[in-house]
Amino acid sequence: MAGNYLIMFLAGIGIPLLAALNAALGRHIGSPAAAATVLFVVAFCVALITALVTGTEGFGKLASAPKHLFAAGLFVAFYVLSVTWIAPKIGVGNAIFLVLLGQMASAAVIDHFGLFGAQVRPLNLMRAGGLALMVLGLTLAQRA
């Protein structure tokens, strides 16, 4: 269980690194869209290799999967394209700050209603207070 938490912590570290690196690549080559395309090619190769190593039986079940679940790819593309274009204009810190605010709001709604098969975790006063403290902490960290 602790390993899962560590992996997610490391994934969180990777998000601003992704934003900074891809924004820098976009600036360097003069095309945020081309930089995003390169990112997706690299990510595709890594995901494909991982699937080949861990087992490809999931690919056979894709045809029966609910089609709305494929929208996740649209959200990844929107995130990568938007952060690649906007982070150089407003700063990586500001971009990630806004991303984190959006993630917290979205996660609270998904958990509260158990959307997409997520475990239901009602938004009670304690959780709402925790989220408010996180927003306050993010805001203070960004203004400091």
Image (cartoon, rainbow, N blue to C red):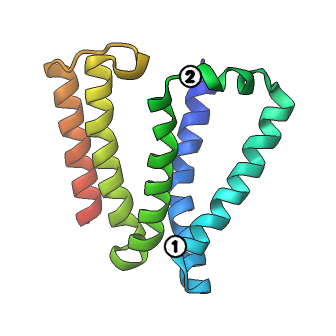
Identity, as a three-letter code, of the amino acid under mark 2: Ala
Considering depth in this image, is 100 or 65 the residue closer to the camera?
A: 65
Closest to the observer: 125 or 90? Answer: 90
Question: Is residue 68 or residue 18 the one in the foreground?
Answer: 68
| Residue for point 57% across, 66% down | 36
Give the percent coordinates (x, y) of residue 29. 62, 85
Q: Is residue 21 visible?
A: no
- Residue type at mark 1 is Ala
- Above or below for 49 versus 25: above
Q: Is residue 92 left or right of residue 13?
A: left
Q: Residue furthest right?
A: 53
Residue 61 is drawn in which quadrant? top right
Q: Which mark is residue 53?
A: none
- For the point 50% across and 59% down, the residue is 80
User: In the image, is 95 to the left or to the right of 23?
Assistant: left
* Location of residue 39 (image quadrant): bottom right
Task: Find out whether the residues at labels 2 and 1 contact each other: C-beta distance under 8 Å.
Answer: no
Residue 101 lies left or right of residue 50; in this view the side is left
| The quadrant where residue 17 appears | bottom right
Query: Which is more N-terminal, label 1 or label 2?
Result: 1
Nearer to us: label 2 or label 1? 2
Q: Is residue 91 above or below residue 47?
A: below
> Residue tagged by mark 1?
23
Residue at coordinates 74% horizontally, 22% vertically from top-left? 60
Say which quadrant the C terminus sits in: bottom left
Q: Position of residue 68 (x, y in %)?
A: 44, 31
Figure disc tally: 2
Question: According to the image, label 2 marks what residue?
Answer: 65
